[in-house]
């Protein structure tokens, strides 16, 4: 049974949970609490994990040996105990975990269904990949609302292939979501080191416990990330690979510097507790992606590199946006921008880009001499469920980018009819006023009403833009002493 078949079988179990009043938004969380116990058992029994991570009372045979109310009560007690475990990683995974199941027969049906899956075939493909497939399936279901946490796998894989993470480097994602970027970087290194066997034991220990670090604001999403990492053999420190906290607050300010930063920060204007509360960023802004970009630059080591997914407004926004771009091009070599096609994110209708840059130093000026722009958006297919994004769609860009992760390989300007062009820093300043929203190809695709994002997405974008404008005006009034 192929991984995708098992994912579909797991997803079909949603029907069982719906009968117990559990909706899409809670479905994956409910299933993975149980699924993780099964996967941990399979990994430990097959030797993928060096030893069981779960205590005896929480292992899979303890569930299969029970039935009825005895099973449901034991499961509830197990979740409570795990949330209070002295093992900080296990307690983090099961923090505040509790089952929403009320009918013992539904839990028993889930346990029997999971036990009936061909786990030998699943292990051949990797339980971590199966788990990621389930997360992707959840993200593609618009009713679940999980798309905001999921970056398409082909995009992640293309970025990681170009950035070439190396053993011994520290890799961070300050907006980790379900840890897709970190896991792809780990997989890349394993693929180039014979699954780490080419490394010394000390180097292998570093890769398992210190190489990768993420931060995630939402506790339930962090739970998914911790499970995802552990199933891929990534253990991290005492708190796991992904820590819980606000990157735009003091928790983010305390993150160490890294060699490589890979991220798809949340879009929009900060509200509630998710806004910047730290005072070490150069330019104050309520725009989350501008704040995240500043964080990433600040937390790169000199000589470090980054690839960051950002919406179009970061490229053209005036005021603080222009200040952040100039600061970026001073402190870093911003060498490449990839204009992504629309429709590739499950829960986003916004237009996005990937910025690739190399940190020179925090005090540097004039570090960027030219920016190469690859337009993957003009005349692109209409991506969506009918035309999914695949690895093949990135092949031409990967070839044009070249083999050097910092964009220093020889490149060819393809001219006005091509997709890849070079623009000097002087031209960007004089002709574009430091806007990086650069397009030259005529797009023959015309959007009709069916191609537009959901009305709620359009409304949210408009509100975010208005809030950002109001925040900037208030900042100007404050500087002028006009705020009461």
Image (tube, helix red, strand yellow):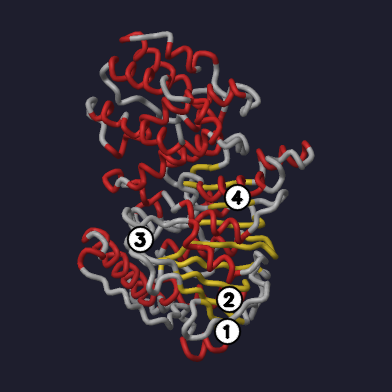
Q: Which mark is residue 329?
A: 2
Residue 185, disc: 4
Q: Secondary structure at mark 1?
A: helix
* Observer-nearest of 355 and 367: 355
> Residue 75, how many percent across, how many down?
39, 17
Badge 4 crowding class, 10 Å Cα cut-off, few under 14, some 14 to 19, many 20 or more, is many
| Mark 1 crowd level (few <14, some 14–19, many ≥20, 10 Å Cα) | some
**Which residue corresponds to the image point at 52% horizontal and 36% vertical from the top-left?**
128
Residue 383 badge: 3
Q: Could you tell me how far apart the alpha carbons at marks 2 and 3 are, in whole angstroms?
A: 32 Å
For the residues labelled 2 and 1, the Cα–Cα distance comes to 9 Å
Frontmost of labels 4 and 1 is 4
- Closer to the eye: label 1 or 3: 3
Residue 178 image point, x, y percent? 47, 44
Q: Image check: 173 left or right of 352? A: right
Could you tell me how far apart the alpha carbons at marks 2 and 4 are, in whole angstroms?
26 Å
Of label 4 and label 1, which has the lower sequence position?
A: 4
Say if mark 2 contacts mark 1, CB within 8 Å: yes
Is the C-beta separation of discs 4 and 1 under 8 Å?
no
Q: Earlier in the sequence, mark 2 or mark 4?
A: 4
Q: Which residue is found at the position 54% from the left and 58% from the top? A: 158
Label 2 sits on a secondary structure element that is helix
Q: Residue furthest bottom?
A: 430
Callout 2 environment at 10 Å: few (<14), some (14 to 19), or many (20+)? many
Report helix, strand or loop for mark 3: loop
Residue that carries the numbered disc 1 in the rendered image = 425
């Amino acid at each position: 049974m192929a991984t995708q078949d098992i994912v579909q079988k797991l997803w079909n179990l949603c029907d069982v949970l719906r009968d117990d009043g559990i909706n899409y938004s809670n479905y994956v969380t409910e299933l993975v609490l149980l699924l993780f116990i099964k996967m941990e058992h399979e990994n430990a029994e097959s030797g993928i994990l060096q030893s069981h991570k779960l205590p005896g009372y929480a292992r899979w045979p303890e569930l299969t040996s029970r039935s009825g109310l005895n099973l449901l009560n034991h499961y509830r007690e197990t979740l409570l105990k795990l949330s209070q475990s002295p093992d900080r990683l296990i307690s983090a995974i099961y923090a505040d975990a509790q089952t929403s199941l009320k009918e013992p027969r539904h839990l028993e049906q889930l346990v029997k269904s999971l036990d009936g899956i061909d786990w030998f075939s699943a292990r051949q493909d990797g339980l971590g990949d199966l788990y990621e497939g389930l997360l992707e399936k959840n993200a593609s279901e618009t009713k679940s609302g999980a798309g905001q946490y999921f970056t398409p796998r082909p995009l992640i894989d293309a970025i990681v292939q170009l950035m070439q993470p190396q053993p011994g480097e520290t890799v961070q994602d300050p907006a980790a979501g379900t840890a897709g970027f970190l896991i792809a970087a780990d997989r890349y290194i394993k693929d180039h080191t014979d699954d780490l066997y080419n490394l010394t034991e000390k180097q292998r220990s570093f890769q398992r416990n210190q190489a990768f670090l993420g931060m995630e604001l939402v506790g339930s999403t962090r739970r998914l990330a911790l499970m995802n990492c552990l199933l891929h053999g990534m253990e991290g420190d005492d708190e796991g690979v992904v820590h819980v906290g606000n990157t735009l607050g003091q928790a983010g300010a305390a993150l160490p510097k890294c060699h490589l930063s890979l991220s798809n920060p949340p879009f929009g204007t900060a509200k509630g507790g998710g806004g910047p509360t730290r005072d070490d960023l150069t330019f104050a802004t309520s725009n989350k992606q501008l704040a995240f970009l500043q964080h990433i630059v600040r937390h790169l080591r000199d000589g470090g590199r980054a690839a960051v997914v950002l919406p179009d407004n970061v490229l053209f926004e005036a005021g603080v946006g222009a200040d952040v771009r100039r600061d970026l091009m001073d402190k870093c070599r911003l060498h490449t921008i990839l204009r992504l096609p629309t429709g590739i994110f499950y829960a986003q209708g916004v237009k996005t880009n990937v910025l690739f840059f190399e940190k020179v130093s925090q005090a540097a000026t004039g570090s960027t001499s030219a920016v190469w722009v690859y337009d993957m958006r003009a005349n692109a297919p209409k991506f969506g469920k009918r035309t999914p994004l695949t690895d093949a769609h990135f092949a031409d860009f990967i070839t044009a980018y070249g083999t050097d992760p910092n964009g220093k390989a020889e490149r060819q300007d393809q001219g006005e009819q091509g997709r890849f062009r070079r623009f000097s820093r002087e031209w960007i300043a004089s002709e574009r006023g430091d806007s990086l929203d650069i397009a030259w190809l005529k797009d023959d695709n015309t959007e009709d009403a069916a191609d537009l994002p959901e009305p709620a997405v359009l409304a949210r974008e408009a509100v975010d833009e208005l809030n950002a404008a109001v925040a900037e005006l208030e900042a100007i009034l404050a500087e002028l002493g006009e705020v009461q």
